[in-house]
């Protein structure tokens, strides 16, 4: 699997859209951006948004339409044996190892550790992204 970045944070979304944070947040809130996930800790008042790169690239001319599960499948990518190395997902989803550990500790993500490598199960990633999709 290549090291493709598919979810990006607010600074990259601002760059793609040529807008400030408030304008981008307004686009999320009014539904102009539909492929956005909130990675913040449960109960947090501050959102930690991730934006799907294919949607950002398609704007303003159009945007990818898909069933949420199809979009989530594309955000996760290939998962040999139903899992993926957490380090790979850190790159794909633009998140730190600390955030991964926090999400595992909160049981938002799950997977085994083999040696020094944390794996995330596809099932836990699908459930996490489905639950965190901003609607």
Image (cartoon, rainbow, N blue to C red):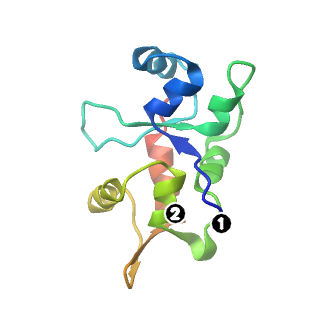
Q: Which mark is residue 97?
A: none
Q: CA distance from mark 2 to mark 1?
A: 9 Å
Residue at the spot 42% in from the left edge and 71% down from the top edge: 111
Residue 26, above or below 72: above
In the figure, is residue 114 to the left or right of 102?
Answer: right
Near-viewer residue (104 or 54): 54
Residue at the farthest bottom position: 115
Near-viewer residue (45 or 53): 53
* Label 2 CA crowd tier, 10 Å (few <14, some 14–19, many 20+): some
In the figure, is residue 97 to the left or right of 133?
Answer: left
**Residue 101 lies in quadrant:** bottom left
Near-viewer residue (56 or 121): 56
In what quadrant of the picture does the N terminus appear?
A: bottom right
Residue 3 x %, y %: 60, 59
Residue 54 x %, y %: 67, 37
What secondary structure is found at the residue carrying circle 1?
Answer: loop
Residue 85 x %, y %: 49, 69
Residue at the spot 65% in from the left edge and 62% down from the top edge: 2
Residue 105, above or below 92: below
Residue 75, above or below 66: below
Q: Which mark is residue 88?
A: 2
Which residue is tagged 1?
A: 1
Residue at the spot 30% in from the left edge and 57% down from the top edge: 98
């Amino acid at each position: 699997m290549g090291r493709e970045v598919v979810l990006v944070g607010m600074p990259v979304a601002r760059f793609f859209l040529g807008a400030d944070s408030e304008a981008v947040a307004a686009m999320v809130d009014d539904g102009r951006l539909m492929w956005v996930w909130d990675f913040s800790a449960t109960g947090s008042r501050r959102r930690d948004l991730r934006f799907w790169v294919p949607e950002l690239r398609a704007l303003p001319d159009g945007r990818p339409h898909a069933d949420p599960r199809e979009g989530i499948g594309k955000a996760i990518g290939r998962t040999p044996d139903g899992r993926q190395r957490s380090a790979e997902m850190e790159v794909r989803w633009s998140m730190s190892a600390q955030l991964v550990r926090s999400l595992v500790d909160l049981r938002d993500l799950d997977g085994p550790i083999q040696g020094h490598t944390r794996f995330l199960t596809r099932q836990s990633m699908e459930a996490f992204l489905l639950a965190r999709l901003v609607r």
